[in-house]
Amino acid sequence: MSKELLMTVEEAASMTGYAPWSIRQFCNKGMFTAEKPRGDRGGWRILRPSLEKWWADKRRASLNTRRVA
């Protein structure tokens, strides 16, 4: 798989504003496509298009919520 298609937890955290710990939890829950190429030692590698789609959907959903004062 191409390097530019994969991103680290830290890159994903920077892009979304979530903490790296939260991104790891999302990976564990399967919220977007991610893999651990070296098992527990290598850390997560996240598929960029999958994360971008998840993030766009999440942002769109937050814009559609009605806020009551």
Image (spheres, grey):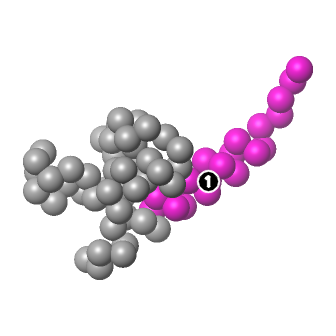
What residue span does the magenta drawing correspond to?
A: 50-69
Instruction: Report the quarter where the N terminus lies.
Output: bottom left
Residue placed under numbered mark 1 in the picture: 57
Task: State the image quarter where residue 28 is shown.
Answer: top left
- Tell me the residue at 29%/79% (across/down): 2
Task: State the image quarter where residue 22 is shown.
Answer: top left
Q: Is residue 26 left or right of residue 28?
A: right
* Residue 46 position in % (x across, y down): 34, 59
- Tell me the residue at 70%/42% (across/down): 62
Whether the magenta-drawn stretch holds residue 43 is answered as: no
**Regarding mark 1 in the picture, which secondary structure is present there?**
helix
Task: Name the outermost residue toward the bottom.
Answer: 2
Residue 30: in sight, yes or no? no
Residue 35: in sight, yes or no? yes
Q: Amino acid at mark 1?
A: Asp
* Residue 60 position in % (x across, y down): 70, 51
- Tell me the residue at 47%/51% (across/down): 14
Q: How many marks?
A: 1
Task: Name the outermost residue toward the top.
Answer: 69
- Tell me the residue at 87%/24% (across/down): 68
Q: Please tell me whether the stretch drawn in magenta is mainly helix, strand or loop.
A: helix
Q: Is residue 39 above or below residue 3?
A: above
Instruction: Report the quarter where the C terminus lies.
Output: top right
- Looking at the picture, tell me which residue is in the foreground, 1 or 4: 4
* Residue 29 position in % (x across, y down): 35, 40
* Residue 42 position in % (x across, y down): 15, 53
